[in-house]
Image: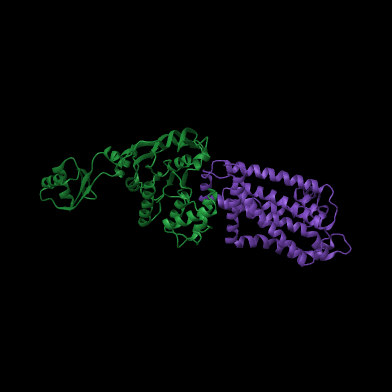
């Protein structure tokens, strides 16, 4: 997707925040052009949620300047609030109210008037596939339904900028795909999306630009392809029948990364057919049980840039 | 966005939200209103005969004690309502929806005013029910309509005061359990005053406390208005206490709500 240069929807410079002496954000600079999707990617505790909280006027920064849709969040928070929609990491719905009542509550607080409020609530219920559950308390909704309602509530005021803090954490794969489609539709309507996620696949799927946040600082920023280019290429993983086969193959190939327990060798490769054929020719009739091709993905980028172990673990809270 | 009309509109919206909560959590409302009724019946029919004899009135007995204890039970109703308020506020603060409200261009204290108005409605309803039950079992005040109105006004003032204080309790508490404990002393205050027995009958230290604590002048004012006992300086003291507590509760609650909500 090409990005037409325009006024940034979000601009943050030198963002700092500490909680009780513990530095959470240590000088973060961000710029998100209008109508694009920006993904802030990072492990638990990296400062993603704190960043969203500051950008969405929930908390103040210790230092730095933030402008959302041209308004300064510290000096004119209400002007920012009027044009944003926020969907939090933990669902921000009133569980005692029904889905419809939640949406009308938002419409009332946006001072849309009774008729317009009801019209928008009905339209959002339909768009987010919540019509059947509209008259049931949100407490009875499934995780995916609550997230959809949550997002719908953020959209009642027709926001220009939408913040989504880990919108698919804890959702099943199907609900995740539904949410992705909803996000794509929003972008098609010209909305700017600021998304945090710990799923690299999600950033890869949705985002125009991705920033990696680690321990309060940005360690990399760019498009998914740019980031992938920053790390060494992919590899081919070969699993052998026994240790002798592994030994002899390792001697032949030399530069491979060896795992004696799994009986595997990892050989750097760009994964195309010609280089694969060449590799197999070199190994002759070695007993290869299994072969897999690994092209670089954002996981590799993340590991290379942050030295963090597996980040796909569910958050422990 | 902070103009008066938005302040009123947003508070009304939040009040509607509170009413819906009360309807869905009706058991809480029933409990908050039922407990004082049970206490009234307990004190009149179980303890009333004996306690009434101690009031030093030759007519004595249960009927006399019923008259005496009603203002005390009314204040228990107010104090119990406060416990409900603190719990409701604390529960609300743990919900993501309040964080959402903070990121919306609304009259900021409207979440709190919604709670206060909702709780006040609930408590006033409780006061009506308790008074109704008292009338049913023989409570016969000799108050004029103006005196009834004045008594209702004093009770509304103490309810407002205690409710704002409870909102602050609900905000300052780190957990819902803590929030339910913080207003507990309020429930005991009517006992440690002139609500259930005359303060003069208590030992010196306790009597001193009973005479100077805020619920006593409120009790005495309500009693005086409904039953024609001497009010004296109680009315002024009651109004002063109510105003003071309301102001402290309101400012404290605003301050607590305005601080950054995370960690």
Can I make out residue A314 in this image? yes
Describe residue B222's horizontal placement relative to residue A21 as left or right: right
| Foreground residue among A30 and A261 | A30
Q: In this view, does A8 lie above or below A175?
A: above
- Which residue appears at 70% of the width and 61% of the height? B36
Along the viewing direction, whichever of A91 and B42 lies nearer the viewer:
A91
- Which residue, as the protein is rendered here, is positioned at the far right? B58
Can residue A94 be seen at all in this image of the molecule? no
Left-right relation of B234 to B25: right
In the image, residue A310 sits, relative to residue A129, either above or below, namely above
Q: Dividing the picture into quarters, in which one does residue A30 lie?
A: top left
Q: Where is residue B241 in the image (x, y as percent from the top left)?
A: 74, 45
Q: Position of residue A120 (x, y in %)?
A: 48, 54
The residue furthest front is A115
Quadrant assignment for the N terminus of chain B: top right
Q: Colour of chain A?
A: green
**Residue B101 horizontal side relative to residue A254, left or right:** right
Identify the image quadrant of residue A226. Answer: top left
Give the chain letter for purple. Answer: B
Q: Position of residue B78 (x, y in %)?
A: 70, 55
| Residue occupying the point 79% across, 48% down | B205
Q: Position of residue A129 (x, y in %)?
A: 42, 58
Indicate how the structure is coloured in the image: by chain
Q: How many marks?
A: 0
């Amino acid at each position: 997707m090409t990005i037409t240069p325009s006024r940034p929807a979000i601009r943050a410079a030198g963002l700092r925040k500490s909680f009780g002496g513990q530095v959470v954000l240590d000088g973060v600079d961000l710029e998100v052009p209008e109508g694009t999707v920006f993904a802030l990617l990072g492990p638990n505790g990296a400062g993603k949620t704190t960043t969203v909280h500051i950008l969405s006027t929930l908390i103040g920064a210790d230092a730095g300047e933030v402008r959302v849709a041209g308004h300064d969040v510290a000096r004119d928070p209400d002007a920012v609030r009027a044009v944003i929609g926020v969907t939090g990491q933990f669902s921000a719905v009133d569980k005692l109210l029904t889905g419809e009542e939640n949406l009308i509550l938002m419409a009332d607080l946006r001072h849309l008037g009774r008729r317009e409020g009801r019209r928008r609530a009905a339209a959002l219920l339909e768009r987010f596939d919540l019509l059947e559950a509209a008259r049931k308390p949100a407490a009875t909704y499934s995780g995916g339904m609550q997230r959809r309602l949550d997002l719908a509530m953020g959209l009642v005021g027709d926001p220009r900028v939408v913040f989504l803090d880990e919108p698919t954490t804890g959702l099943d794969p199907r609900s995740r795909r539904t949410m992705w489609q909803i996000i794509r539709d929003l972008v098609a309507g010209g909305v700017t999306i600021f998304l945090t996620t710990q799923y690299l696949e999600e950033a890869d799927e949705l985002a125009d630009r991705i920033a990696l946040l680690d321990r309060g600082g940005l360690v990399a920023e760019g498009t998914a392809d740019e980031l992938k280019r920053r790390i060494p290429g992919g590899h081919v993983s070969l699993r052998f029948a026994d240790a002798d086969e592994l030994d002899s193959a390792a001697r032949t190939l030399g530069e491979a990364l060896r795992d004696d327990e799994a009986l595997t060798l990892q050989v750097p490769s760009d994964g195309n057919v010609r280089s694969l054929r060449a590799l197999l020719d070199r190994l002759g009739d070695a007993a290869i049980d299994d072969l897999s091709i690994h092209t670089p993905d954002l996981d590799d980028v993340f590991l290379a840039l942050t030295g963090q172990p597996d980040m796909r673990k569910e958050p422990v809270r | 966005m902070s103009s008066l009309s938005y302040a009123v509109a947003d508070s009304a919206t939040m009040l509607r939200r509170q009413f819906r909560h009360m309807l869905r959590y009706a058991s809480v409302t029933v409990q908050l209103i039922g407990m004082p009724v049970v206490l009234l019946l307990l004190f009149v029919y179980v303890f009333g005969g004996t306690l009434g004899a101690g009031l030093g009135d030759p007519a004595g007995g249960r009927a006399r004690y019923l008259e005496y204890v009603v203002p005390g039970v009314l204040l228990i109703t107010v104090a119990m309502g406060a416990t409900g308020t603190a719990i409701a506020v604390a529960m609300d603060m743990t919900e993501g929806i309040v964080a959402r409200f903070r990121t919306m261009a609304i009259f900021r204290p409207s979440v709190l005013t919604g709670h206060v108005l909702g709780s006040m409605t609930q408590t006033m309803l409780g006061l009506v029910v308790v008074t109704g039950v008292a009338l049913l079992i023989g409570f016969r005040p000799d108050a004029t309509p103006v005196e009834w109105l004045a008594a209702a006004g004093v009770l509304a003032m103490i309810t407002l005061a205690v409710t704002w204080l409870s909102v602050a309790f609900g905000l300052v508490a780190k957990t819902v359990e803590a929030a339910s404990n913080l207003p507990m002393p309020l429930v005991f205050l009517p006992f440690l005053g002139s609500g259930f027995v005359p303060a003069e009958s208590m030992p010196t230290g306790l009597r001193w406390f009973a005479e100077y604590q805020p619920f006593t002048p409120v009790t005495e004012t309500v009693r005086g208005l409904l039953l024609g006992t001497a009010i004296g300086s109680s009315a002024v003291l009651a109004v002063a206490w109510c105003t003071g507590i309301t102001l402290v509760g309101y400012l404290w609650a605003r301050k607590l709500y305005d601080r950054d909500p995370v960690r």
